[in-house]
Image (cartoon, grey):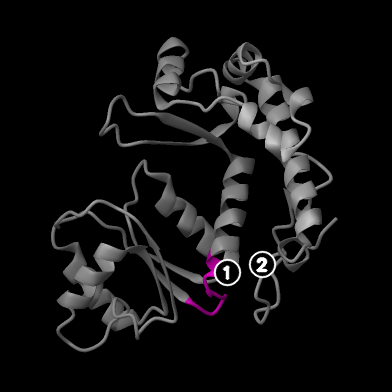
Amino acid sequence: MTAGVDTSVWPPRYDPAYRPDPTADCWFPELECLSPETREALILDKLRRQVAWAWERSPFYRRKWDAAGVSPATLRSLEDLAKFPVVQKVELRLSQAAAPPYGEYLCIEPGEVARIHGTSGTTGRPTVFGIGSEDWARIGEAHARILWAAGLRPDDRVLICSFFSLYLGSWGALRGVERLGATAFPFGAGVPGQTLMAVEWAQALKPTAFYGTTSRRRRGARGSTRGPSAFAPSSSRASRARASPRRSD
């Protein structure tokens, strides 16, 4: 067992009490600093276990892979992954229409769903995601690892300026900040005039890190009229940006 995670079982089991030394560059140094050969062997092992998990629990994946002549048994190398067909968004929508509300690709029992998220539906029917409590904890682990690599540490105060809605990303960031041990400031986005409100709150609480879109950060920096704020690149020690279409608020 590597410090913080047991990869001998599937899904992996994480130690919720684990946290690396604040001076460490990596969340999981033992895993993230593996030799390329050992890392690829670990990736293949985890990939094979995940494919087997979906094969055993999801009629959707089993049918699709069987039709393509692939299965967990045919995944013998990372190169074999190219033989597995790509899942199209329309297939997920059809599956959810045939077996509402989650479709046949849900790999847990419906009663185990702890959270429901989904897409906005801007390009068609919204896609629903059913997430179990154990998966939610793993999402927190993944985001904590990402945020740690971006430079965040437990003594940070993180201003999260992205949408808190069915969209999963902001919730994952919030869970990751909490798992990392930092202070989360989930301000949100999308409300008219919210950028100016965020600037005022940032000037009062002085967050050390920012999570949001690059366009929101630029608007926040332009909206700051009382001196530097967390939106100014020189005022926060770390930031995490994601892409988004341009819009006004």
Q: Which mark is residue 27?
A: 2
Of the pair 26 and 172, the residue shown nearer to us: 26
Q: What is the x, y in percent for residue 193?
A: 14, 63
Q: Secondary structure at mark 1?
A: helix
Q: Which image quadrant is residue 37 in?
A: bottom right
Which residue is found at the position 25% from the left and 34% from the top?
Answer: 122
Which residue is found at the position 64% from the left and 42% from the top?
Answer: 134
- Marks 2 and 1: in contact by CB < 8 Å? yes
- Between the residue at mark 1 and the residue at mark 2, the CA separation in whole angstroms equals 6 Å
Of the 4 image quadrants, the one containing the N terminus is bottom right
Of the 4 image quadrants, the one containing the C terminus is bottom left
Magenta stretch mostly in which secondary structure?
loop
Q: Which residue bears the numbered disc 1?
A: 148
Tell me if mark 2 has few (under 14), some (14-19) or many (20+) residues whose alpha carbon lies within 10 angstroms of its own.
Answer: many
Q: What is the x, y in percent for residue 234?
A: 35, 85
On screen, residue 30 above or below 206: above
Which residue is found at the position 53% from the left and 75% from the top?
Answer: 151
Magenta region includes residue 149: yes
Q: Callout 1, which amino acid?
A: Trp
On screen, residue 45 above or below 100: below
- Regarding residue 3, the answer to whether it shows in the image is yes
Which residue is found at the position 57% from the left and 75% from the top?
Answer: 154
The residue range painted magenta reads: 147-156
Q: Secondary structure at mark 2?
A: loop
Q: What is the x, y in percent for residue 26?
A: 66, 70
Magenta region includes residue 151: yes
On screen, residue 239 above or below 59: below
